[in-house]
Amino acid sequence: MTKYVYSFGSKKTDGRADMKNLLGGKGANLAEMSLLGIPVPAGFTITTDCCNDCFFNKSRFPQGMEEQVQKALKAVENEMGMKYGDPDNCLLISCRSGARSSMPGMMETVLNIGLCSRTIPGLIKRTGNERFVYDSYRRLITMYSDVVMEKAEGIEPQEGKGIRAQLERIMDELKKSKGYKNDTELTVSDLKYLCSEYTKKIKQVLGSPFPDDHMKQLWGGIGAVFKSWNGKKAAAYRRIEGIPDSWGTATNVQAMVFGNMGETSATGVAFTRNPATGENKFYGEWLPNAQGEDVVAGIRTPNPINEATKMEQNRHLPSLEKAMPKLYKQLHEIERKLEKHYSDMQDIEFTIQEGKLYMLQTRVGKRTGTAALNMAMDMLKEKLINEPAAVMRLKPEQLDELLHPIVDPAAEKNAAIIARGLPAGPGGANGHIVFKAEDAVEWEKKGKKVILVREETNPEDVAGMRAAEGILTARGGMTSHAALVARGWGKCCIVGAGAIHVDSISKKMTVNGKTYREGDVLTLNGTKGYVYEGRLNMIDATENVNFKAFMKLVDRQRRLGVRANADTPADAATARNFGAEGIGLFRTEHMFYGENSEKPLFLLRQMILSSTLEERKSALDKLFPHVKSNIKATMKVMQGLPVTFRLLDPPLHEFIPQDEPQQKELAESLGIDVKEVVRRGELLHEVNPMMGHRGVRLGITYPEVSEMQIRAIFEAAAELIKEKIKAMPEIMIPVTCDVNEIKVQKKIIERNYKEVITKFNLKKIDYLTGTMIEIPRACLLADKMAEEAQFFSFGTNDLTQMGFGFSRDDIGAFLPGYLDKKILKADPFQTIDQEGIGQLIEMGVTKGRSTKKDLKVGICGEQGGEPASVKFCFKVGLNYVSCSPYRVPIARLAAAQASIEGAAVSKKPVKKAPSKKKAAAKKK
Ligand code: PEP
Ligand code: MG
């Protein structure tokens, strides 16, 4: 016979902590606490298998389960010294849900089960507290009718017509007529009146009476908790969190204990360490004479648990330590024991019933990034955990919090979101809005903090973007220009906030009918993509002393390389500071926008608008020293670490000036008419520039453009070598789709290499030649590409664009709909689409290495700093990931965790299952 029911309590416990799949998190931990000798109200857990069998069985309990429940209930009665349904000494129970992973608030709970006309008088007599009994009864009727009689029956009332809402209205009306503010003012006769009105209403609305029978209540409660697994809320949550429907929930049936039985009773919630800061102090809140929901619902201001953690706001309130010193001591000992046992910070719930302490729950507590870091390092020092465990304690995303100033979560809680966009650059920012890049620069010069708001950004906005605290655009995706640049600078940025209509000419924007003008203040949460009106408080993410030590641990576990995408000496320095082991992508074109780029940009424009080889060569000659000095400065910062220089990639028309004074200046320098400048610019216009004359295609049409860059790279390296500074350039050819493209460019590379070596009288320069892999055809022919390339770098921005056929700059119009309708699980420009694009990557790696066993393979698309993508890259055997400098620590952590998880997975098959004997010994 299948065992469906597992008891827990001081006398008999069948389960344990590692049985979460069968007993759910709550049930497994209640069993574990019982095994540890911690006082837990006796009860039993009905398994997740039973839940699944019920669904299979058309909502009927499986055979044998009811007898097992009856038997377990007997054991609870014996332990608690009360009897379920007994008129004189009745036991009340709760039915609580508990899945294998926590789904907070998504499933149902019914408390105070067993109260009925048969048991009420005896309970009043025993407790001498009529108000307590009727208050409990009122709560039972509300919960039961809502959870068991309505939700579990699949009734879907209209908004505001649900039974709970209707009952609450009766209570509100009564409170109003009596002039009460709080529920606590309700008298015994009020509560009696409510209970009788409630039962009438239930009959009238739901057509059946509230069951005045303790056994009916018990089975109803158990069945309803199981059914709540398929409730709308729970099902939707599972979709989002990727929790399989097949897991099911367990039901925990447990003896009720009451914290509201008078002044020697209390209830509380606590953490074994401070979840906000990580400080190693027992931290929590409690209330005398109250039920658990009163603490969390904020109806009363809770008291601090001890003297050591009192704050300004609650200094005047009594601590549990002072009010009930003996019980506090016992609780303190228990929380120490639990933390030690689980080797992690615990979030616990307790109730004190007439001077006796009971633990109702323990689970691993949620925490902020700062707290996670501090706790991991402290627990390592305390030898509570080992190094790999410490590295697993921080979610990579949590590092963001430590690296950027953030919007104060407390301020955010009370603020209304006016628009949402894509969280392109993390952290927070507030400031005056401006609508033009030059205005951002002007305002910043005057010492004002600004947010640059644009329909979308283009290279000409860069100075304004640099000057702004944050960037907000109405269009664009995660890999749009604004996002790339902002992330590179660690700047807060939200793109694709579709609700915003920008009118940069009149310097205003409208959002849902409201207009904001230049100078108005907004706050951005770039980590979430939320826009707020006004100035919200910011928290300074000051550098934590533990951060560096933690990152050392991370690097000891890591096997995947981490580089940065950087294209200026300043960004390179930031990247090194964050631990980058090289530059995986230096976008040459970024040299032409940004600080001090007016001159090189002008020369580039001259080159682009040249119509003859002669004109072009003359412009290239003038451009050469600028390009070389930029390259040299970056390599110098990197001190011999590899730097991957990518040859010019973007469509040239992006650089053509649109405003008249600049067109005039160019015309003069080229000795042509302005009209001719405009005409030449128009000739460069492309219908589909992303698939147009860009990348290696430029170098095929204009070999002299490649030649100038290649020469600059080699000469810069040669000069550094002469200055006794190590240099390790890697030349990368973008947007290739055929090996012959590489061959053509390689000829230029090899010729220039020889010439430079001779010119500088050097024996050699260490360098590599490789290619981006960012077109599906390049993946399909990767074995051929590897014949000529020494390394591959997956450009997953373009690979995703071309693999999906989604324009990376236009996804704002349709991708949100795809995500809302669950057509796609995630934005593939943010996290690698492992199912589809992932296949292309794996194929590229396998085919490439079939030709060249030691082919070095990396990734430099924006996903390279996203934790799930980093883990995928490790799994498919990449040598390194490359991402924006501020994401380097995140990628390092994700990479280390991938190694640790990989080691655990590879060990799994060889690990023997514990013998029955051992498991039994452990149980004891
Ligand atoms: C890419 O396509 O992934 C890439 C890194 O290149 P870019 O974003 O410059 O096109
Ligand atoms: Mg690309």
Image (spheres, rainbow, N blue to C red):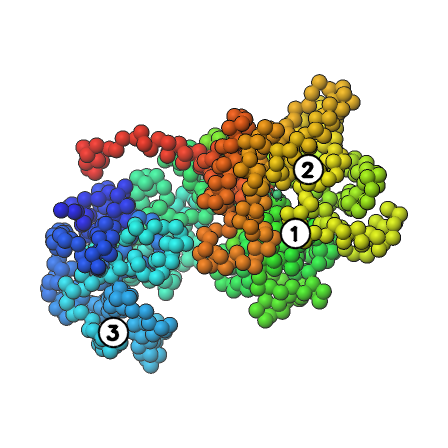
Residue beneath label 2, please? Answer: 647
Q: 629 or 920, which is in the foreground?
A: 629
Question: Residue 736 or 43: which is nearer the viewer?
Answer: 736
Q: Which residue is mark 3?
A: 206
What residue do we see at 50% from left, 43% from top? 837
Instruction: Identify the residue under disc 1.
Output: 688
Dot 1 or dot 3, earlier in sequence: 3
Instruction: Say left or right for 610 vs 306.
Output: right
Viewer-nearest of labels 1 and 3? 1
Ligand 1 neighbours mark 1 (CB distance < 8 Å): no
Position of 625 with respect to 910 (left or right) is right
Residue 206 at least partly seen: yes
User: Could one spot residue 859 in this view of the protein?
Assistant: no
x then y, percent, for residue 568: 68, 39
Indicate if the residue with disc 3 has its beta carbon within 8 Å of ligand 1: no
Q: Outermost residue toward the bottom?
A: 177
- Label 2 with label 1: CB-CB less than 8 Å: no
**SS for callout 1:** loop
